[in-house]
Image (cartoon, rainbow, N blue to C red):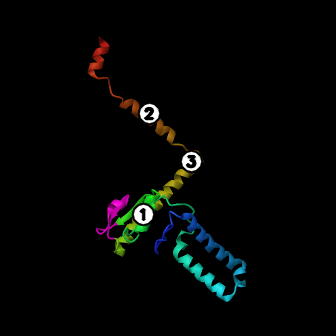
Amino acid sequence: MPFITERWPGGMLTNFITIRKAIKKMATIDRMKKDGTFLTLSKKERLQVDRLRAKLEKNLGSIVDMTRLPGALFVVDIKREHIAIKEAQKLNIPIFAMVDTNSDPRQVDYVIPANDDASKSIDKILTHVTEAVKAGLNERKSEKADKAEGKTEAKPAKAEAKADKAEAKPAKTAKAANEEEE
């Protein structure tokens, strides 16, 4: 999963196209190093390019594989990462966050009450969250594999649902039954 551990780059979600351009720039620098054109630059230019690459790696290296906007956002400290919260709210991205007593829980869709300053607390909650994400991804993979094999369990489930609805229909009331008899 993509993650940000450094300062949140403003506009990372709302201006995602520009962020993607910066990531492409990092990829072109890597290509330059592989094909040898990097060595044709002067020493000063190589130094500048190396510094640019290091800066991009530090800020955006963890989201290199992110090709689209995320489906959800997990934030550890909503007070410190208020820009990320505002961007996610603007784009209607669900927010899961650890909320301490010094924060406003109304800004978050899914609140996890926890101490967002203690490393043990963060570690424990992130462990549970990552396990849940892995379990969900594995479940999604198995469902896709089942669909690819042609196994459809949806049809029997629909038939069972119809049978349940038929059984759940209310019986005629006593008044309606008396009217029918007359």
Image quadrant in which you'd find residue 79:
bottom left
In the rendered structure, find residue 162 and report the number of the disc placed on it.
2
Query: Would residue 153 be counted in the magenta stretch?
Result: no
Give the amino acid at mark 3. Answer: Lys
For the residues labelled 1 and 3, the Cα–Cα distance comes to 38 Å
Image quadrant where one finds the C terminus: top left
Q: Earlier in the sequence, mark 1 or mark 3?
A: 1
- Mark carried by residue 42: none
Drawn side of residue 34 relative to residue 118, left or right:
right
Examine the structure image and report whether residue 103 is included in the region drawn in magenta.
yes
Which of the marked residues, 3 or 2, is nearer the chain's N terminus? Answer: 3
Q: Given contact means CB atoms under 8 Å apart, are the residues at marks 1 and 2 in contact?
A: no
* Residue 7, above or below 166: below
Vertical arrangement, residue 50 with respect to residue 81, above or below? below
Q: Secondary structure at mark 3?
A: helix
Image coordinates for residue 24, horizontal then vertical, percent: 62, 70
Tell me the kind of residue under disc 2.
Lys
> Residue 101 location in percent, x, y?
28, 68
Q: Point out which mark residue 86 bears.
A: 1
**Real-space Cα separation, disc 1 to disc 2, in angstroms:** 44 Å
Q: Which numbered marker is on residue 147?
A: 3
